[in-house]
Amino acid sequence: MAGRADLRLGIADVAPSVSCRAYSARAVVGEWIPITATVFGEGHDLVAAAVVWTAPKGTSGKPHIPGQGRGLVSYGAGGTDKNPGASRQQVVRMQPDGEEPDRWTCLLTPATQGLWTFVVEGWRDPWATWLHAVHVKLDAGQDAAELANDLELGAGILDRAAAGATGPNRRTLREAAGQLRNENSGLTARVASAFSTQVDALLQATPVREMVTRSARHEIWVDRQRALYGSWYEFFPRSEGGLDANGKPVHGSFTDAAKRLPAIAEMAFDVVYLPPIHPIGEVNRKGPNNTLDPGPEDVGSPWAIGSKEGGHDAIHRGLGTEQDFADFVSQTRELGMEVALDLALQCAPDHPWVTEHPDWFTTKPDGTIAYAENPPKKYQDIYPLNFDNDPAGLYAEVLRITKLWVDRGVRVFRVDNPHTKPLNFWHWLIWEIKKTDPDVLFLAEAFTRPAMMHTLAKLGFTQSYTYFTWRTGKTELEEYGQELAQAADYMRPNFFVNTQDILHESLQVGGPQMFKIRAVLASMMAPSWGVYSGYELFEHRPVRPGSEEYLDSEKYQLRPRDYAAAEAAGQSLAPFLRRLNEIRRAHPALQQLRTVQFHHIENGNLLCFSKSDPGSRDVVLVVCSLDPYGPQIGTTALDMPALGLDWADRFPVIDELTGAEFEWGQYNYVELGPHREVAHILRLRQPQIGFA
């Protein structure tokens, strides 16, 4: 079996590593990344390990190291005339895992966007080996004569360390070596300096290294923070036109939709997601509730893209002009948010591509073009694209339209059904865009098989829709949360509580309490979450029993809503959503994915979990009811070390939802339900927080 012949020591299971380095691992600026490896050697000599961490080309950015001065020592930074690229490097000592033999770990966080790389170095550590051996022999009662060779070996190691040191550090090391050789002193005095914390710190900072072995180079692509953390709000600009004098809905424009932006910003959302804004096909246009007999004034589905008015590069005339869209994007940014645009690679039968490039579609034996189907659903108003007949032409056109919207100010795309297009196409498109615009993000709307979802994430998608919508029980929520945390090296989930396509049964029957429960779970468990407009108004009526489609779905008709009236009447969830998003902004712990930790609570209808941030030492503890109908009582059995606490500690907590203050410990009585809040969101700060 082939392998590396240069591995003097063993270096294995380096992480993060995605599909054996076939893809770059993923992180965001400021995210704490655990880098781990198994490093070992033959015999009983001790080994040590470090990470050589290299910033992207064109930068001199170095990571902030959590715990600097508490055992995570960096050395070897800085360039030379012969190797100026080394100025982008920092070498960071790894620490023993503490639980798994030969496993080493450290935490790093990248300071800039771009492609960071790292190599794990392992070496035989003669100083640590010497210290261990001498301590053991002293404990066994050996005297100076028996330790003569050991004392000289130690002095020789200190001589080697001193040769690479300067100034006072060199003197300190030479003096310690001299003491070890001083036969006129007692044994305790001879080893005192060598055992000192000062000498240990110097040997940690400038170690004596033997048999240095390097791993392969690993890549981590670092995005901006929005790739991991953000609160999304979806709405249809065309529904913002209000009603005319006869109570008939009026088609809204970007100017109308902009009036809704302050209310969305008031709820502390970060991303405003718009369905497709292009011309809508007239051929096979759908009517209300997905019917096949539209009237002359029916607006059709925005996902049936293209007509004689244009295709993916055009704007629906009812929404306005390119300048109107630019103004909408600008106003969104002024309010501290950004626009996400739907990228749906499909066409209405009258899309210009159908006549200009018929080979971009699949033709059936009878000569007609196949429309989209997902039995029992039929989409007669949509033609799927065929990426195999003319890949060069189609790839180039999709790149053109994507760049066009990037140039128009869009930096986030929600991609419709990417699992129905070739994987190599997405890998090519995403990284072509990132060559010139590395801040552009892509959210995969792919409710499909796990292998496809995970591969889309690995090859470049920034975020992923998930199965959260269908995870409602305690066990499945815990298992899914752990699964996503374990995939954090490449897959970033976005927990949408509902979408224009999905009204889960729990929301149909659970009432307002269930809307609150699902919002708490989504916003607290995942760094990114989202709602589709109408959620704050508790919209819950399906088109028919057993269906997840909304009655009078906004996909096929205008749905003007009176949000202000509902809030004034106390019948809106908007204040609650605002508070959840404010809590998320205030707590770095809730902006993390890797650190979710589930805790035992003695009730199947109560879920308990915590999240932490290693940098700020911020910790948030959440207990949420899963039952919208009645009170739920339980007792926690917290994993105290996971909270940075000793098992017997008592600690103050403040409920971020109610302001109530409690003193908690490992075991705590909890009562949640209809006459109380649906959850406790408790804040606490502790001195030592790492990854669970």
Image: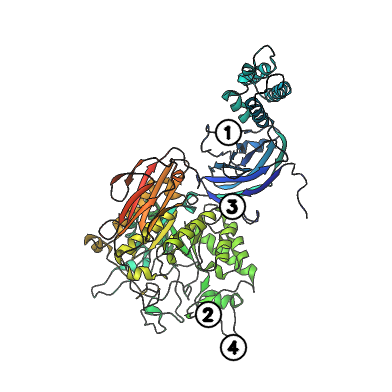
Q: Reading the chain from its start, which is encountered first: label 3 or label 1?
A: 3
Amino acid bearing label 2: Tyr
Q: Reading the chain from its start, which is encountered first: label 1 or label 4?
A: 1
The alpha-carbon separation of the residues under discs 2 and 1 comes to: 61 Å
The residue at the far bottom in this view is 366
Task: Count neighbours of disc 2 (C-alpha within 10 A) and say few if under 14, some if 14 to 19, many if 20 or more.
Answer: many
Task: Count neighbours of disc 1 (C-alpha within 10 A) and say few if under 14, some if 14 to 19, many if 20 or more.
Answer: some
The x, y position of residue 155, in whole percent, is 70, 22
Residue 354 at least partly seen:
yes
Considering the image in quadrants, where does the N terminus appear? bottom right
- According to the image, label 3 marks what residue? 25
Residue 251 at least partly seen:
no
Q: Reading the chain from its start, which is encountered first: label 2 or label 3?
A: 3
- According to the image, label 4 marks what residue? 366
Residue placed most toward the observer, 582 or 99: 99
Amino acid bearing label 4: Asp
Query: What is the secondary structure assignment of the residue under circle 1?
Result: loop
Query: What is the secondary structure assignment of the residue under circle 4?
Result: loop
Relative to residue 275, is residue 490 depicted above or below?
A: above
Q: Which mark is residue 73?
A: 1
Which label sits in the foreground, 2 or 3? 3
The alpha-carbon separation of the residues under discs 1 and 4 comes to: 71 Å
The x, y position of residue 616, in whole percent, is 44, 40
Residue placed most toward the observer, 597 or 400: 597
The residue depicted at 32 percent of the width and 48 percent of the height is 656
The residue depicted at 61 percent of the width and 61 percent of the height is 428
Q: Reading the chain from its start, which is encountered first: label 4 or label 3?
A: 3
The alpha-carbon separation of the residues under discs 3 and 1 comes to: 24 Å
Query: What is the secondary structure assignment of the residue under circle 2?
Result: loop
